[in-house]
Image (spheres, rainbow, N blue to C red):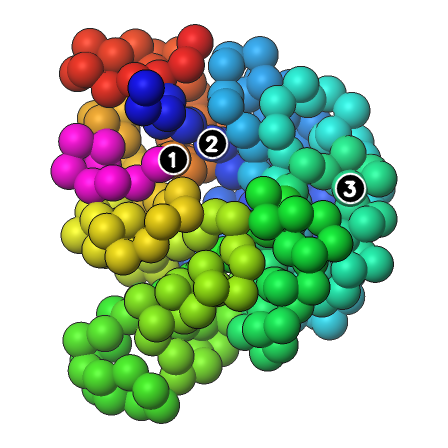
Amino acid sequence: MALAKRIIPCLDVKDGRCVKGVNFQNLVDAGDIVELATRYSEQGADELVFLDITASYDKRETEQSWVRSVAEVLNIPFTVGGGISSEKQVELLLKQGADKVSVNSAAIRNPELITRIAKEFGSQCVVVAIDAKREDKPFGTYRAGDWQLYVQGGRKPVGMELMSWAKQAEELGAGEILFTSMDHDGTNNGFAIEQYDRLSNSLSIPIIASGGAGSAQHIVELFQNSGADAALAAGIFHRGEVTIAQVKQLMINAGIYARF
């Protein structure tokens, strides 16, 4: 039997508050992290992702007290990311209530980090997050028209290409890939469906799609037209435009398996 497609709200956290922007810029306050986490858990979210979005840029670890306060109100799997660069940090976050960790900038600097975390805590614990956008000019190892990776919360290009890094991450032990299209982030115009289909056809691990969800229909279209395993969304849920239950009902009406 096919696995249920997952709906995953995301908390982008800055200074202890949930924020939301467009194309990773112009961040505005989106609410209290504990209140939002409670709402999504009660609405039937399959998982929750928490990203301390300035940790890598500020060269600090994820704030554990924020993680603990959110974990205390959840009864669903909980992924935490931001500034994670060692197995010790992973251990501390798991003790605060995280079920998985998301690594991004540190994994690009030191790919062996993925393998080390997977060996100590299991591949199911390692989500490799990738932030990328399409570039018109060649640079580093990618060609014009390819998707270039960015680190430090989308601030710094690294001259690496999306597909090759995703494949390498899988080989190193990643349990899932969380790909955010920076071009689509916060635009509410729908997902980069073609890229999620390419990833799902190229990899054997689950793909979480992020960036561009502006309606429940966009999520349905993602699952109808790509092999993505999960849809991550923020703004439409934070603003209360649609509930998770409403999204899942629309999915079921469209013949997509969702878990209530």
Q: Residue at x 40, y 43 (%)?
A: 206
Q: Residue at x 30, y 40 (%)?
A: 228
Please indicate whether residue 34 sits to the left or right of residue 64 in the image. left
Q: Is residue 92 above or below residue 41?
A: below
Q: Is residue 178 visible?
A: no
In front here: 82 or 58?
Answer: 82
Q: Is residue 44 visible?
A: yes
Q: Answer few, some or many: residues within 10 Å of disc 3's Cα (few below 14, many 20 plus, some between 14 and 19).
A: many
Q: Determine if the magenta segment contains residue 2.
A: no
Query: How far across and how far down the image is residue 23, in percent?
Result: 37, 58
Residue type at tag 2: Ile
Residue type at tag 1: Ala
Mark number for residue 94? 3
In the structure shown, which secondary structural element does the residue marked by tag 2 occupy? strand
Q: Residue at x 22, y 27 (%)?
A: 220
Q: Is residue 32 above or below residue 157?
A: above
First-in-chain label (1 vs 3): 3
Query: How far across and how far down the image is residue 22, in percent?
Result: 38, 53
First-in-chain label (3 vs 2): 2
Query: How far across and how far down the image is residue 94, in percent?
Result: 78, 42
In the structure shown, which secondary structural element does the residue marked by tag 3 occupy? helix
The residue to which callout 2 is attached is 8
Mark number for residue 230? 1
CB under 8 Å between callouts 1 and 2? yes
Q: Determine if the magenta segment contains residue 226.
A: yes
What are the residue bounds of the magenta stretch? 221-229
Please indicate whether residue 166 sits to the left or right of residue 20 in the image. left
Residue type at tag 3: Leu
In the structure shown, which secondary structural element does the residue marked by tag 1 occupy? strand
CA distance for labels 3 and 2: 19 Å
CA distance for labels 1 and 3: 22 Å
> Which label lies toward us, 1 or 2?
1
